[in-house]
Amino acid sequence: MGQFAFIIHPISVREDMARKYKAARCLPESWVEWLIKFMSAKPISHISGIRSQIGAEAEGWFVGCPLTPRQFLQLNGEFVTNKIIEAGRVAEDLGARVVGLGAYTSVAGDAGVTVSRNLDIAVTTGNSYTVATAVEGTLQAAELMDIDPAQATAAVLGAAGSIGRVCAQMLSRRVARLMLVGLHTDPLDEVVEALPGDAQVEVSTDSNSALPRADIVITVTSALDSVIGPEELKPGAVVCDVARPRDVSRLVAERRPDVLVIEGGVVAVPGEVDFGFDFGFPPGTSYACMAETMILALEERYEDFSIGRELSEERVNEIAALAQKHGFRLAGFRSFERAVTDEQIAAAREAARRARVSR
């Protein structure tokens, strides 16, 4: 049986910390964040019931790293990395042989490289399967919004980065037109030279001119604040926000009922998995980054898989093939920490139709 662990952390001081410590609801967030800096990483739950369609099994553990998103971004980098390493050592003590870095633990510092050097087990950020499901989920969402990818215009924001580059490579085979958006044109030109598909390609440093023309958007910038607001998007557009911190402002969800924003796919886990912890997903499903860690455990591939700032299409395709082998599949979408329902998609599709008619 494969063994893995996955490091999680509180996203919301009010909601997540208050599940465990009721007093957190009564204290200012700054006080709670100051207090949790002194807490140690610890096991959260045991994960059981993962059974591949080919018969392999795995068990795991959630390990809590007590820092909030703001702390990951604002505290001293060495302090943050040491907190993640501490959580990794808890995973080692539990018996895990590969550990996944969840949420902001995957983007802190050098994206797992230093963490790996300080642990005796394998490390992954889960980014490869995250990209695989993001592209697959985005194309599925586009079709649900009556967008034919083969006739569509797609934009990748942050296309010169490692994740953006791979997303651009995969989309270039599936869409008619592709806009690569970044801060500088030279790196974008290098991405263009390596694109394998037949899409018509243009590069831009101005997202405000690109977004109104895009039917499909994948955004993966490293900006600290949101870069996509409600005014820039085309009616009926599908936007997949892979970035952490988020690239898409919450105002898009509030003001643009004709736009569908997703965070990538919800992944169905094979077997009768019991996570022993409610992280807000429907039963039997997980984030793609969690699923990558499970897949490596099922394969007993105890090696660093997705770490650092470089990512390859080969790795993305490899983990996608392994996911299919073991029976992992997309099972819906998430948007701003909530499940996207069929009714919401239908409402967005209808709102987009009305918006196009009124233009």
Image: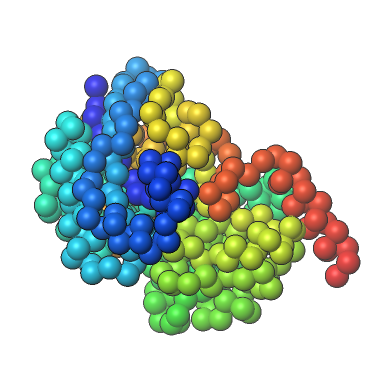
Residue drawn 74% across and 58% down? 258
User: So how many labels did they put on this image?
Assistant: 0
Q: Quadrant of the C terminus?
A: bottom right
In depth, the one of 285 and 277 nearer the eye is: 277
Task: Give how far across and how far down residue 48 sits, in percent.
Answer: 34, 23
Residue drawn 17% across and 57% down? 82
Residue drawn 81% across and 51% down? 350
- Regarding residue 113, the answer to whether it shows in the image is no
Residue drawn 41% across and 24% down? 273
In depth, the one of 121 and 42 nearer the eye is: 42
Task: Give how far across and how far down residue 263 sits, in percent.
Answer: 53, 52
Residue 120 picture quarter: top left
Task: Give how far across and how far down residue 303 sits, in percent.
Answer: 19, 42
Looking at this rendering, what residue extends furthest in the top direction? 55
| 354 on left or right of 7 | right
Task: Give how far across and how far down residue 24 sits, in percent.
Answer: 41, 51
Residue 175 picture quarter: bottom right
